[in-house]
Amino acid sequence: MRELSRRHPSEVIVFPDRSLDTDESMESRGLRFREILNSSRPFDRLLRHLSSARTSVDVCLYLLTSQQLADAVLGTMRRGARVRLILDHENVALSGSQVPRFYAAGAFVRSRPSDYIMHHKFAVIDGRKVVTGSFNWTMQAVMGNKENVVVTEEPGIVAAFEEEFEWLWREMGRDLEEEDEDQSGISMSWADITL
């Protein structure tokens, strides 16, 4: 983990934690996953960034199966942050997907069928911080894959990711058949998703 700038805080986080035995098999790591998660400094750092949201978290992902990462984002929602989630349509109902938890919590979720994959992996936190990189939000990414996450508060980069998220949000919602109002008065849009 390396801070890149004092003016606009930035950090590079690499996975897996370098303290892990690189020759250890996936099966062996799988048996020790709780131990690894509880001691992984990169994972702890990522969770802290996600949990830091006060007003909003906009997440755009290919895949979301990590319960711990979902917990971090859903925790911000319980503290009053607005959560919007865009996912690749093919992975919404995948075994282990955390998307049903977001629906149940009342998060805004959009996805739509396409001939192409939605391969982004980023989150915009409070409109001032971006978390992005090669990292899919899965346990395999945390525990074994060679992955990177860049976290930055550089205004130009944050603005570019905000613009992309807003464009995708509109694009994913342009054919919505249903608009519902939840009990708090927040307009909730439901995409064509079968769970």
Image (tube, grey):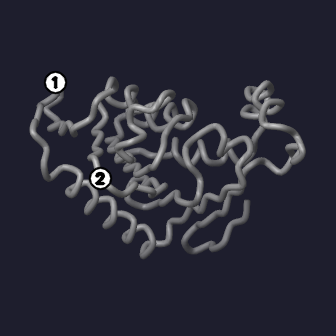
Secondary structure at badge 2 equals loop
The C terminus - image quarter: top left
Question: Which residue is located at x 32 percent, y 41 percent?
Answer: 82
Q: Position of residue 19 (x, y in %)?
A: 87, 46
Disc tally is 2
The N terminus - image quarter: bottom right
Q: Is residue 49 above or below residue 153?
A: above
Which one is in front in this view, the residue at disc 1 or the one at disc 2? Answer: 2
Q: Is residue 63 left or right of residue 12?
A: left
Callout 1: few (<14), some (14-19), or many (20+) C-alpha neighbours within 10 Å? few
Secondary structure at badge 1 equals loop
Callout 2: few (<14), some (14-19), or many (20+) C-alpha neighbours within 10 Å? few
Q: Amino acid at mark 2?
A: Ser
How far separated are the C-alphas under marks 1 and 2?
A: 32 Å
Question: Which residue is located at x 33 percent, y 65 percent?
Answer: 164
Q: Are marks 1 and 2 in contact (CB under 8 Å)?
A: no
Q: Is residue 71 left or right of residue 167?
A: right
Q: Is residue 62 left or right of residue 16?
A: left
Q: Which of the labelled discs sits on residue 183, or is there none?
A: 1
Front residue (pair 98, 94)? 94
Q: Position of residue 139 (x, y in %)?
A: 64, 37
Q: Is residue 74 above or below residue 61?
A: above
Provide the residue designation for mark 2: 114
Q: Position of residue 38 (x, y in %)?
A: 74, 31
Question: Which residue is located at x 13 percent, y 48 percent?
Answer: 175
Q: Is residue 39 left or right of residue 58?
A: right
Q: Position of residue 23 (x, y in %)?
A: 90, 45
Say which label, 1 or 2, has the lower sequence index: 2
The image quarter in which residue 157 lies: bottom left
Q: Amino acid at mark 1?
A: Gln
